[in-house]
């Protein structure tokens, strides 16, 4: 077989790109390239391949593509689907459904698959010519492993998400699912990408496996499909519209070997005063011990570029504070999303901080025990949950305000910068970003939770918390408040109990009856946290120790929502 095929996976953006060629003819294409293109050029040369075309499966929003860089380096044509015609600011070739690109024996067939975007295409690879069996299909953002492309990203520019979802349904069933089950699936993204909500950590699959396991490909009417793929999507990062627009424009090429300038502290401060954003790419623990006042912490070890794109406006000048030797990597990763305006990096940050402590501050970080104390004693405490909707659906800290990190910069005016504020995410990385962002915008008392919601959820209920055993609850007199989720309540609950899920409690305090409340959950953990929160707000409450598990073990009755005997799930 003369097929040459390589997948390149960029973990920091969950991005997959491909070099596809014919070793007999030496002809090749690159599909959905990242902006720094040296690796494609090296591999093509090493394998005797000439890159003739750069194929884009759609206008990408989550990264700035390398199509212009590759075209400049190789003379390759840039190829899009037919629906992209007239929408780009540089020369392109557009191909419609059923068009073929011959690399010699290896054949590439274009499938028009609108839905994620109008111009989306997929590419079927056949090693033995256009009538041969498919080796695989490059699915772009149409089909992922475990998910499909979200159809709502273009809602802000006039595309109806429901109509796009219907287009996506047709594309999946009339173009991709008609391929043989053993056809390999090679998507443009994996887990962590904001282009879907349920992407797998796997980077390859088959049509047959996805037909069996992908939630969006299960038998359902189109209306149910529309609901399934439009609900529960996270807020798109702030930079997505910027990147999608830039990918359609002619713009300056990335030069990969430019050295990042090292700047003295006084020059950094002058740029910061003039509007430059200082991004500190050290890990959150280093940042917490000491950092330049007004800087924003986005650790290089995580999804650095994506999160920078969520906390600052595109086009603003950037000053970096880095671990020595990582400046070039930080600059390249920012360039991958089109953030090219890096002025330079602070020279020797630790020495600068030690020499000028008047410009240095620390991050306030709370253990879950200290946070619980504050939650119970600080009446005006504001808690901000910066996780995405799918994470919050599994539980929230009582009273928390839900503002996902991609929304935070746009929704600062909903928060009071004078009130004590605690932010949290799942584990602590995003909350360090969020708390530093708030401080950079004038918030005076901001902390985050070490370990995030995961640490809070795992925390044991304090032994000193007012509690009552399940066997001792008098259902004739007790005011029971069940804070479990809807499916838990439906399966089995105490008759006469009031049901308000923990995540909804802050918005439904007006529904609580007067008198001492007995708080109920599955095991006593969530209810203990709710009890702590209510007591801190002057509401008399007691925790039912052991929760519904203890209630059931004591032989006390449960009913489901149909009136039958209930169970604890």
Image (cartoon, helix red, strand yellow):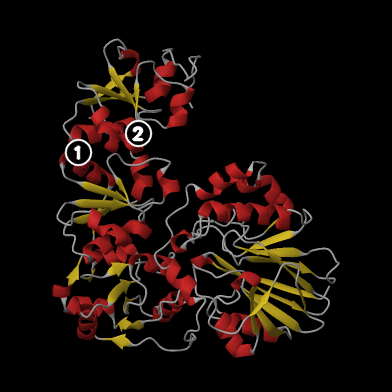
Q: Would you say 314 lies left or right of 252 here? A: left
At horizontal 60% and vertical 84% (from top left) the residue drawn is: 91
In the picture, measured across the screen, residue 219 lies left or right of residue 393, that is right
The residue located at (54%, 51%) in the rendering is 162
Residue 123: x percent and y percent?
70, 67
Vertical order, 190 against 455 (above or below): below
Of the pair 80 and 108, the residue shown nearer to us: 80
**Is residue 460 in sight in this rendering?**
no
Which numbered marker is on residue 60? Answer: none
Sooner in the amino-acid sequence: mark 2 or mark 1: 1
Say if 498 sits above or below 311 in the image: above
* Disc 2 element: helix
**Mark 2 in CB contact with mark 1 (< 8 angstroms):** no
Q: Is residue 214 above or below residue 442?
A: above
Give the x, y percent position of residue 137: 71, 64
Sort mark 1 into few (<14), some (14-19) or many (20+) by Cα contacts within 10 Å: some
Task: Count up the numbered dots.
Answer: 2
State the CA–CA distance, disc 2 to disc 1. 15 Å
For mark 2, does the 10 Å Cα neighbourhood hold few (<14), some (14 to 19), or many (20 or more) residues? many
Question: In this orientation, does residue 361 appear?
Answer: yes
Mark carried by residue 526: 2
Query: Percent x, y for residue 17?
Result: 61, 71
Residue drawn at 17 percent across, 79 percent down: 355
Which residue position is annotated with label 1?
376
Q: Quadrant of the N terminus?
A: bottom right
- Residue 322 lies left or right of residue 224; in this view the side is left
The residue positioned 62% from the left and 70% from the top of the image is 83
Q: Position of residue 437 (x, y in %)?
A: 27, 63
Q: Viewer-proximal residue, 40 or 323?
A: 40
Mark 1 falls on what kind of element?
Answer: helix
């Amino acid at each position: 077989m003369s097929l040459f095929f390589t997948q390149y996976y960029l973990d920091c953006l969950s991005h997959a790109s491909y070099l596809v060629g014919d070793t007999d003819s030496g002809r090749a294409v690159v599909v959905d390239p990242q902006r720094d293109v040296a690796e494609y050029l090296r591999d093509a040369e090493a394998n005797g391949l000439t890159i003739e075309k750069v194929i884009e499966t759609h206008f990408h929003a989550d990264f700035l593509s390398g199509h212009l860089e590759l075209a400049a380096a190789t003379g390759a044509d840039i190829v899009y689907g037919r629906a992209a015609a007239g929408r780009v600011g540089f020369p392109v070739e557009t191909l419609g459904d059923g068009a073929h690109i011959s690399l010699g024996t290896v054949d590439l067939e274009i499938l028009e698959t609108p839905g994620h975007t109008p111009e989306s295409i997929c590419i079927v690879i056949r090693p033995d010519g256009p009538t041969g069996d498919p080796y695989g299909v490059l699915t772009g953002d149409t089909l992922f492993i475990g998910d499909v492309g979200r159809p709502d990203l273009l809602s802000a520019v006039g595309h109806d998400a429901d109509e796009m979802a219907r287009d996506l349904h047709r594309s999946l069933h009339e173009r991709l699912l008609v391929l043989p089950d053993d056809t390999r699936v090679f998507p443009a993204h994996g887990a962590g990408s904001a282009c879907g909500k349920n992407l797998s950590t796997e980077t390859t699959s088959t049509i047959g496996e996805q037909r069996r396991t992908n939630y969006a490909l299960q038998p359902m009417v189109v209306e149910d499909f529309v609901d399934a793929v439009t609900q529960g999507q996270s807020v798109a990062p702030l930079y997505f519209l910027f990147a999608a627009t830039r990918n359609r424009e002619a713009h300056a090429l990335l030069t990969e070997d430019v050295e990042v300038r090292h700047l003295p502290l006084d020059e950094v401060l002058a740029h910061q005063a003039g509007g430059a954003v200082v991004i500190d790419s050290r890990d959150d623990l280093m940042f917490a011990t000491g950092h330049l006042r007004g800087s924003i912490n986005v650790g290089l070890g995580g999804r650095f570029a994506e999160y920078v794109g969520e906390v600052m406006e595109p086009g603003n000048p950037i000053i970096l504070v880095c671990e020595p030797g990582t400046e070039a990597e930080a600059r390249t990763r920012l360039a991958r999303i089109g953030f090219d305006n890096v002025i330079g990096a602070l020279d020797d940050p630790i020495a600068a901080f030690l020499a000028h402590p008047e410009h240095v501050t620390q991050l306030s970080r709370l253990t879950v025990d200290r946070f619980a104390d504050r939650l119970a004693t600080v009446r005006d405490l504001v808690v901000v949950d910066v996780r995405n909707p799918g994470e919050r659906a599994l539980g929230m800290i009582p009273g928390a305000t839900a503002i996902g990190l991609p929304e935070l910069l746009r929704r600062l005016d909903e928060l009071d910068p004078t009130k004590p504020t605690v932010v949290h995410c799942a584990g602590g990385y995003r909350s360090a970003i969020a708390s530093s962002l708030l401080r950079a915008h004038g918030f005076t008392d901001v902390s985050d939770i070490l370990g995030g919601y995961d640490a809070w959820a795992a925390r044991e209920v304090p032994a000193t918390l007012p509690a009552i055993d399940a066997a001792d609850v008098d259902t004739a007199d007790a005011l029971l408040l069940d804070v479990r989720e809807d499916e838990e309540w439906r399966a089995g609950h105490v008759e006469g109990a009031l049901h308000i899920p923990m995540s909804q409690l802050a918005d439904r305090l007006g529904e609580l009856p007067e008198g001492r409340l007995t708080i109920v959950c599955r095991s006593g953990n969530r209810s203990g946290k709710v009890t702590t929160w209510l007591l801190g707000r002057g509401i008399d409450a007691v925790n039912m120790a052991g929760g519904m598990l203890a209630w059931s073990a004591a032989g006390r009755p449960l009913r489901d929502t149909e009136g039958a005997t209930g169970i604890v799930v």
